Amino acid sequence: MLEKTDLNVKLAKVDATEHKKIGEKYDVKGFPTLKFFKNGVVTEYNGGRTDISIVNWLKKKVSA
């Protein structure tokens, strides 16, 4: 669904159980954890788990 938008956003998946240093650096305590990075600022996503919820949240974050 994200690919069908005009958002200039990249989505990445990291297994913090395998990459423990990254999990520690970004304070991952549970799974799944979604983080948004913009201009060096990290925001944790706490919304719904549907694709539409996530994409709508990203639209707001990108336009802010």
Image (cartoon, helix red, strand yellow):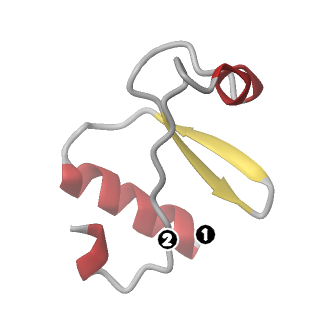
Residue 59 higher or lower than 37, as above or below: below
Mark 1: few, some, or many residues within 10 Å (few <14, many ≥20)? few
Q: Residue 64's mark? A: 1
From the top left corner, tell me how far across and down residue 32 is, in percent: 38, 26
Q: Determine the secondary structure under disc 1.
A: loop
Q: Which quarter of the figure is the N terminus placed in?
A: bottom left
Q: Nearer the viewer, mark 2 or mark 1?
A: 2
Q: Which quarter of the figure is the C terminus placed in?
A: bottom right
What residue lies at 45% left-to-right and 59% top-to-bottom? 11
What residue lies at 46% left-to-right and 29% top-to-bottom? 33
What residue lies at 42% left-to-right and 69% top-to-bottom? 59
In depth, the one of 4 and 44 nearer the eye is 4
Taking the image as shown, residue 32 lies to the left or right of residue 39, namely left
From the top left corner, tell me how far across and down residue 19 is, in percent: 62, 27
Q: Determine the secondary structure under disc 2.
A: loop
Q: Which residue is mark 2?
A: 9
Q: Amino acid at mark 1?
A: Ala
In depth, the one of 18 and 44 nearer the eye is 18
Residue 29 higher or lower than 53, as above or below: above
Q: Quadrant of residue 63?
A: bottom right
Mark 2 → mark 1, Cα distance in angstroms: 14 Å
From the top left corner, tell me how far across and down residue 37 is, in percent: 65, 54
Q: Amino acid at mark 2?
A: Val
In depth, the one of 51 and 59 nearer the eye is 51
Residue furthest to the bottom = 6
Mark 2: few, some, or many residues within 10 Å (few <14, many ≥20)? some
Mark 2 / mark 1, whichever is N-terminal: 2
What residue lies at 29% left-to-right and 76% top-to-bottom? 3
Q: Are marks 2 and 1 in contact (CB under 8 Å)?
A: no
